[in-house]
Image (cartoon, helix red, strand yellow):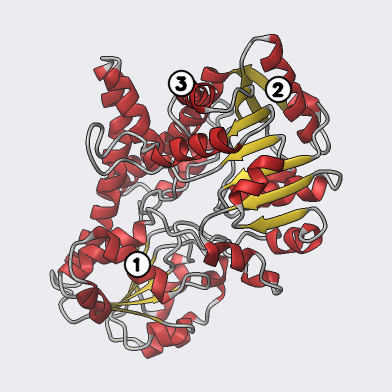
């Protein structure tokens, strides 16, 4: 089947960038991204592409090139589904907060709603692509809904998980390590796989396009994220041992990273991983293992989450202990709120949990992040439901200028590895702060010798 029209349900961190790149690289294909959130769609359609809802280096340029030509953003979900030959499902799959599997299993209610809407609207054969990260064998449930509630049309279900790192999503899309497509082993299933392979082949060499059965594709995504998170928790576990023994975690990471069997990636000690995927996917993996009675497997993967939570708590405790065991009414400046640099995504950011701990100790938090608004910061704290919204508002403020954020602070905590932090006039910051002036580097980002020479009391993870 020659593909001329694609629809993506969900205009978030995966759907928006992925469809923008497909549209740019496939000008012969009409790509429509739909979402019921009108505010989000309006932002994608903003004439100033710098105001699009997702910040990724290079994304606004791609959107500007393709939007209005063959890339469209709309709230008209029904029309887009009706016209498309391939429908990507790219909606949120958060961890369940209720019922069976609460706190671990993926909440698939949005996936099911999409499947039922597709089944209701579709009048001709469709290829439905799982783009959201889903538990293994979700495709089976989607196909059952489509086949039993539809209009007698034929559906093929493909799994095409994303392997994007926020902050480098555009580069990852333009030059992927691999494209993974899982489908049914029937003749119809293989034809559907070929149709999607042909779309990606417009810019990705076929030797980088891997095809599998659906279940392998679904599980590969969870496994990849679990392995990456495992490396982060492993190096963070060693960082605590370094602090006790006098070793330096950066030096240890450099030493082991030169081993070709280990490699240097994901060995940067930090205050802990965040983002929408790692914790959610590992908890999902734990739940799946437990549901099959594989308790030892579940315990193994769950320890990664336990270590990550411990690292965040350890960081906030270190701030309190170093500041003479009290932070009450002390101004603590956070440089960074996003979970990593080059993104405005704050989901599961370590900053949220460290701030929450310090506010519980009656600290006053000042935040500077170049891409995250005060509205979003306060929403993140309110989501924890630890205290009232008014209490959060009274305990935290944000600044557009980092020097103003640091003025009169007792301590600075580096929570995101934004490159610009390395270029600040740290002497000027030191002169404006309460003395002694503390820096807690949760990202091992700054020059420790330079800061100590200025007069800062400097502490970094693992050193």
> Left or right: where does residue 423 sit relative to residue 315?
right
Residue situated in front as seen by the camera: 373 or 78: 78
Q: Quick check: marks 1 and 3 in contact, CB under 8 Å?
A: no
Answer yes or no: is residue 258 visible.
no
At horizontal 24% and vertical 73% (from top left) the residue drawn is 389
Which of labels 2 and 1 is toward the front? 2
- Residue 193 numbered mark, or none: 2
Disc 2 crowd rating (10 Å Cα; few below 14, some 14-19, many 20+) is many
Q: Quadrant of residue 339?
A: bottom left
Answer yes or no: is residue 183 visible.
yes
Disc 1 crowd rating (10 Å Cα; few below 14, some 14-19, many 20+) is some
Q: Is residue 23 above or below residue 225?
A: below
Task: From the top left corner, tell me how far across and down residue 312 is, in percent.
Answer: 29, 53
At horizontal 43% and vertical 32% (from top left) the residue drawn is 226
At horizontal 27% and vertical 78% (from top left) the residue drawn is 393
Task: From the top left corner, tell me how far across and down residue 322 is, in percent.
Answer: 21, 67
Q: CA distance from mark 2 to mark 3?
A: 17 Å
Q: Quick check: marks 2 and 1 in contact, CB under 8 Å?
A: no
Earlier residue among tags 2 and 3: 3
Q: Could you tell me which secondary element the residue under label 2 belongs to?
A: helix
Q: Could you tell me which secondary element the residue under label 3 belongs to?
A: loop
Which residue position holds label 3?
A: 137
Q: Could you tell me which secondary element the residue under label 1 belongs to?
A: helix
Task: From the top left corner, tell me how far across and down residue 385 is, in percent.
Answer: 21, 61
Name the outermost residue toward the top: 186
- Residue 379 numbered mark, or none: 1
Disc 3 crowd rating (10 Å Cα; few below 14, some 14-19, many 20+) is some
Q: Which quadrant does the C terminus fall into? A: bottom left
Earlier residue among tags 2 and 1: 2
Residue situated in front as seen by the camera: 85 or 194: 85
């Amino acid at each position: 089947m020659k593909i001329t029209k694609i629809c993506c349900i969900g205009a978030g961190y995966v759907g928006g960038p992925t469809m923008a790149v497909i549209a740019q690289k496939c000008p012969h294909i009409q790509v429509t991204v739909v979402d019921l959130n009108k505010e989000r769609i309006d932002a994608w359609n903003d004439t100033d592409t710098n105001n699009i809802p997702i910040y990724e280096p290079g994304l606004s340029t791609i959107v500007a090139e393709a939007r209005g030509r063959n890339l469209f953003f709309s709230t008209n979900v029904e029309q887009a589904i009706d016209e498309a030959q391939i429908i990507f499902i790219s909606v949120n799959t958060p961890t369940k907060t209720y019922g069976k599997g609460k706190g671990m299993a993926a909440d698939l209610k949005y996936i099911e709603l999409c499947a039922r809407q597709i089944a209701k609207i579709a009048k001709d054969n469709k290829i439905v692509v799982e783009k959201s990260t889903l538990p293994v064998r979700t495709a089976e449930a989607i196909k059952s809904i489509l086949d039993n509630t539809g209009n007698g049309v034929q559906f093929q279900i493909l799994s095409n998980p994303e392997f994007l790192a926020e902050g480098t999503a555009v580069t990852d899309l333009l030059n992927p390590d691999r494209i993974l497509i899982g489908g049914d082993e029937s003749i119809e299933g293989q034809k559907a796989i070929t149709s999607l392979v042909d779309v990606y082949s417009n810019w990705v060499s076929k030797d980088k396009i891997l095809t599998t059965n659906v279940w392998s594709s679904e599980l590969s995504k969870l496994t990849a994220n679990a392995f990456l998170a495992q490396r982060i928790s492993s190096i963070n576990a060693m960082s605590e041992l370094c602090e006790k023994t006098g070793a330096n975690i950066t030096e240890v990471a450099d030493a082991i990273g030169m081993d070709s069997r280990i490699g240097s990636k994901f060995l940067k000690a930090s205050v802990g991983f965040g983002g929408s995927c790692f914790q959610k996917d590992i908890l999902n993996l734990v739940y799946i293992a437990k549901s099959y009675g594989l308790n030892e497997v579940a315990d193994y993967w769950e320890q990664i989450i336990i270590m990550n939570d411990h690292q965040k708590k350890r960081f906030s405790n270190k701030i309190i202990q170093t500041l003479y065991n009290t932070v009450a009414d002390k101004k603590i400046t956070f440089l960074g709120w996003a979970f990593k640099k080059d993104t405005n995504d704050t989901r599961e950011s370590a900053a949220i949990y460290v701030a929450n701990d310090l506010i519980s100790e009656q600290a006053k938090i000042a935040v500077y992040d170049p891409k995250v608004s005060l509205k979003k910061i306060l929403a993140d704290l309110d989501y924890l439901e630890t205290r009232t919204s008014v209490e959060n508002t009274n305990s935290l403020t944000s600044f557009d200028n980092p020097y103003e954020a640091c003025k009169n602070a007792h301590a600075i905590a580096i929570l995101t590895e934004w490159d610009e932090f390395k270029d600040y006039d740290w002497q000027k910051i030191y002169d404006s702060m309460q003395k002694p002036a503390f820096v807690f580097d949760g990202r091992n980002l700054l020059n420790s010798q330079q800061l100590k020479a200025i007069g800062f009391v400097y502490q970094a993870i693992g050193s």
